[in-house]
Amino acid sequence: MSPATDTLSMTFAALSDPTRRAMLARLVQGEASVNELAAPFKMSLPAVSKHIKVLEKAGLLIKTRQAQQRPCKIDGEQLKQAVGWIEQYRQLWEGRLDRLDAYLLELHASESAATATQELAPNPDARKPIDTPAKVKRSAEKQAQAVTSPKKPKPATRSARNQPAAKERTDDDELQQQIGFDF
């Protein structure tokens, strides 16, 4: 493990706690005593001192000496290193997101073009009549009749054998009403 990684680990470990981040946010405004840093939190001074020691060990905070007081101030060097480390990954991910965005735009454009050509192309099946089940059945009956009896004259009336059943005619009538045309 390199020393840079170790300091980064300590920096990120120190920044992982919301109390320590709040203390650093206060120190951005200027120096503060331990009591001033402890004021917004409901915790003991020894607990605040432990947080300050973690920040100090990570290199994010410096304690100075002014007579009897030991005010704390922020040290931005370790934050700069952490930001630099994060920045390289931000650039990597932004590059990947830019490439993904370009790919999605290209994909969308090709799909739009394909859809437009499909809409403009004539549909060869559009003029074909729709074959309903009753129409298919009648066509099959005609073909079967043509095969079994070649070129016989058709009788003027249908025989009982070729006459559709009353239920079938009713089904055809209902289907014609639903569809809206005769077949």
Image (cartoon, rainbow, N blue to C red):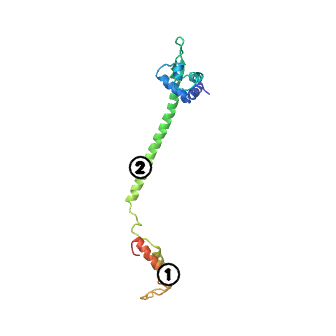
Question: In 3D space, how far apart are the residues under numbered discs 2 and 1 (Cα atoms)?
Answer: 52 Å
Q: CB atoms at circles 2 and 1 under 8 Å apart?
A: no
Q: Nearer the viewer, residue 98 or 49?
A: 49
Q: Residues within 10 Å of mark 2 (few under 14, many from 20)?
A: few
Q: Is residue 66 left or right of residue 129?
A: right
Looking at the image, the residue that sits furthest to the left is 120
Q: Secondary structure at mark 2?
A: helix
67, above or below 53, in the image: above
Disc number for residue 170: none
Quarter occupied by the C terminus: bottom left
Q: Residue at x 40, y 66 (%)?
A: 126
- Residue 122: which quarter of the image? bottom left
Looking at the image, the residue that sits furthest to the top is 67
Q: Residue at x 47, y 43 (%)?
A: 100
Q: Position of residue 140 (x, y in %)?
A: 48, 78
Q: Nearer the viewer, residue 170 or 99?
A: 170
- Residue 46: which quarter of the image? top right
Q: Is residue 93 left or right of residue 179?
A: right
Q: Secondary structure at mark 1?
A: helix
Q: Is residue 80 visible?
A: no
149, above or below 93, in the image: below
Q: Residues within 10 Å of mark 1 (few under 14, many from 20)?
A: few
Q: Nearer the viewer, residue 112 or 68?
A: 68
Mark 2 residue type: Ala
Q: Position of residue 150 (x, y in %)?
A: 47, 86
Disc number for residue 109: 2
Q: Which residue is mark 1?
A: 144
Query: Mark 1 or mark 2, which is nearer the start of the sequence?
Result: 2
Mark 1 residue type: Ala
Q: Position of residue 84 (x, y in %)?
A: 50, 28
127, above or below 42, in the image: below
